[in-house]
Image (cartoon, rainbow, N blue to C red):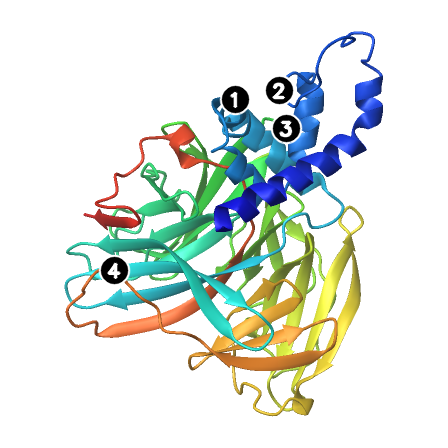
Amino acid sequence: MVLGNFFSNICSNLLWLLKACTFSIKRRDNENEGKTLTLTNLPEDVTIDILMRLPVKSLCCLECVSKTSLNIVGSPQFAAQHTRRLLNSSSAVEVPQLMLLARYSNLQHCAINLQSLKYNGTSCSTKTNFADIVFMNDWYRYEVEFVFSNLFGISRRLSVNRELCYLVNPLRGEVLELPRSDVKAPNYNGYDPCIHDRYGMGFDHVSSTYKIVHISEYAYEISSDIAARVYAMGTRSWRPIQSVPLCHFSNKSVYAYGDRHWLVEGDKSPNNFIVSFDFRKDEFYWTHHPDLQASSSHRFWYDFHLLNLKGSLAIMDYCSYPEEYIKIWVLKNYDKKEWALDYTINMKTFVGRPRGTLLKWGEWENGIFTIQSGVCYFVDLRRGSMKGVKLPPSIMNYNLWTAEQYEQSIFSYTGSMVSLKNYGNLIEAARPGMWFLQ
């Protein structure tokens, strides 16, 4: 029954798009006179144009319809063209979806579980268990460093050897280990450890290349140094970036307008609060932002958060004391760096609201969300309302014996047609949806 609904939706989408493309098809009537018109014998550009308008969910189902459709929508060229269309769209084509991440760890192993999360306005429920990833004999902390569409970058933290990073596509059940980067800071002495590692992913729409940038900060006795390198998916090595701004890249980053943006730790001045990376030029630059409470002495960098609201870069000011408010500025004109204060919400009107510092916020279909003490707070920006919902327990298909640490977090993602199998040798799953990594 469910499969029937999937194909029913696909057929409805295709019929609607075929009607929308009638004009394009009629122009070719003379060439196709006497032929039966089907999707497979349409001109290739018309077929691609039709498929590009379908949602990712329908495209994924089409991969199972026939070998012809699989060859079209499953190709790296189609995925790149589809990504380019999403990035160049004036409106959000793919609605943000939610992924529930649970981290288990003890003195022997660390494990991560990824499940789809649905919020219906009143409660949350887990649907599909996408991935169980167990890091064997490795108790170091692994974190999601970035999310690009439905690709999750998971890196090793709190370790001298931090250059271990995996790309995970939970929707397709794919795990890919990235090549180790060997680029060091100019003054690296071989002894002082790296104190910060940041990763970010983006898409170069000029060369149709997916890229990952890696930033490493080193601390010495009286100074610090920084280095960065960029990796083009499908290649074997990292390329050093010559000019890197000497600043503290925070773990708050977002992808918007084709570039990756980080919030900078420790500074609130409008000219150097957001550092961005251009994946076309492989260059860093500063993104100017509005002067957010610059005269207030009690504000800190972690009171601010970067968001992607329907394709636009946004910065949120969350004040927990004494005013208790949320203010969101949206970058309306990226070229001119023109910001507008689109949302102002008085948090004091919400009974049962979260208290204190909230370090992470994300986007959902109708607004933003945050987590505190196992409760997810959904803010509906359309209505200016908030609702707290207790998170369901995560279910992992691997027994960690005694998990000394357990925590949950939520990430928002959008669908894409990217398949990691086109960019390297995938790590083989021990069984469907489960990987043991050494």
Residue type highlighted by circle 2: Thr
The residue that label 3 is drawn on is: 206
- The count of marks equals 4
> Is disc 4 surrounded by few (<14), some (14 to 19) or many (20+) residues within 10 Å?
few
Image location of residue 146, percent across then percent down: 47, 53
Disc 2 or 1, which lies upstream in sequence?
A: 2
- Name the N-terminal-most of marks 3 and 2: 2
Q: Position of residue 152 (x, y in %)?
A: 43, 50
Residue 35 left/right relative to 82: right
Q: Work out how far the residue at label 1 is from the one at label 3, CA to CA, in angstroms.
A: 28 Å
Circle 3 crowding by C-alpha within 10 Å: few under 14, some 14–19, many from 20 = few
Give the amino acid at mark 3: Val
Q: Where is residue 416 in the image (x, y as percent from the top left)?
A: 54, 42
In the rendered image, is residue 353 in sight? yes
> Which label sits in the foreground, 4 or 3?
4
In the image, what residue type sits under mark 1?
Answer: Thr
Question: Mark 4 against mark 2, which lies toward the viewer?
Answer: 2
Residue at image coords 85%, 25%: 23
Mark 4, secondary structure of its residue:
loop
Identify the mark nearer the N-term, 1 or 3.
1
Please tell me which residue lies in front, 212 or 265: 212
Mark 4 and mark 1 lie on one chain; the one further toward the N terminus is 1
Distance from Cα at disc 4 to Cα at disc 1: 36 Å
What residue would you read off at disc 4? 397
What is the spatial separation of the Cα atoms under label 3 and label 2, in whole angstroms? 29 Å
SS label for mark 1: helix
Residue at 66% over, 18% down: 44
| Label ID, residue 40 | 2
Residue linked to disc 1: 68
